[in-house]
Amino acid sequence: MIAETVCSAVAAAGLGIAVVTAYRKRYLTATRIAAYALVPIGLVMTGVVEWLADTAFSPTAWAGFGVLGLSWLLFATTRTVERRRGGTRKERKAARESAAPAATAPGASAPALGQASSRGQSPAPRQKPAAQGDDDFSDIEAILKKHGI
């Protein structure tokens, strides 16, 4: 009963402010204030205020909110643990099974020489690998010559 009276008083005060604002020729602002002022009356008329007042002072409702909070906490905890482990048990098992056969890239299973000959091209001739020591020193010599040493 008190909540309905307070809402009615707030609505009446808001409508009074809207009238004063309209008197000052600020019609758009006055209309907006009137819209806000009518919300508490609408809530009283629909019974929402009575329901909220009953819920706010009900120990059963507060216990229900506590149970909902506990439920949310359990969901959040399990999700955090699941992320640290790397997914659910099924996801981890599927990842292990799919990782074993996929040791090579999908396009790497066909031999490179077979692809070139199937297109009618001759495969590129292989070059003899240079002696490893000569190759390393030639790079170093080129760098030294570049710097004038």
Image: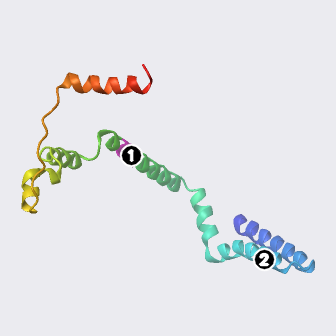
Quarter of the image for the N terminus: give it. bottom right
Label 1 sits on a secondary structure element that is: helix
Query: Which disc, if any, is residue 56?
Result: none
- In the displayed structure, does residue 1 sit left or right of residue 19? left
Quarter of the image for the C terminus: give it. top left
Residue 92 at least partly seen: yes
Q: Is residue 23 magenta?
A: no
In the figure, 108 relative to 40: above or below?
above
Report the span colored magenta: 75-80
Front in this rendered view, residue 14 or 114: 114
Residue 108 on image: x %, y %: 14, 50
Give the alpha-carbon distance from disc 2 to disc 1, as whole Å: 45 Å
Residue 73 on image: x %, y %: 43, 46
Kind of residue at disc 1: Leu
Magenta stretch: helix, strand or loop mostly: helix
Name which residue lies at 83% across and 77% down: 30
Q: Hey, which quadrant is residue 114 in on the image?
A: bottom left
In the figure, 2 relative to 73: above or below?
below
| Badge 1: residue crowd in 10 Å (few <14, some 14–19, many ≥20) | few
Front in this rendered view, residue 139 or 92: 139
Residue 41 on image: x %, y %: 71, 75
Name which residue lies at 23% across and 49% down: 91
- In the displayed structure, does residue 101 sit left or right of residue 31? left
Residue 31 on image: x %, y %: 79, 79
Label 2 sits on a secondary structure element that is: helix
Q: Is residue 78 magenta?
A: yes
Kind of residue at disc 2: Ala
Indicate which disc, 2 or 1, sits on the residue closer to the N terminus: 2
Going by the picture, which residue comes out furthest to the right? 24
Which residue, given by chain and number where applicable, does mark 1 sit on?
A: 74
Which residue, given by chain and number where applicable, does mark 2 sit on?
A: 34
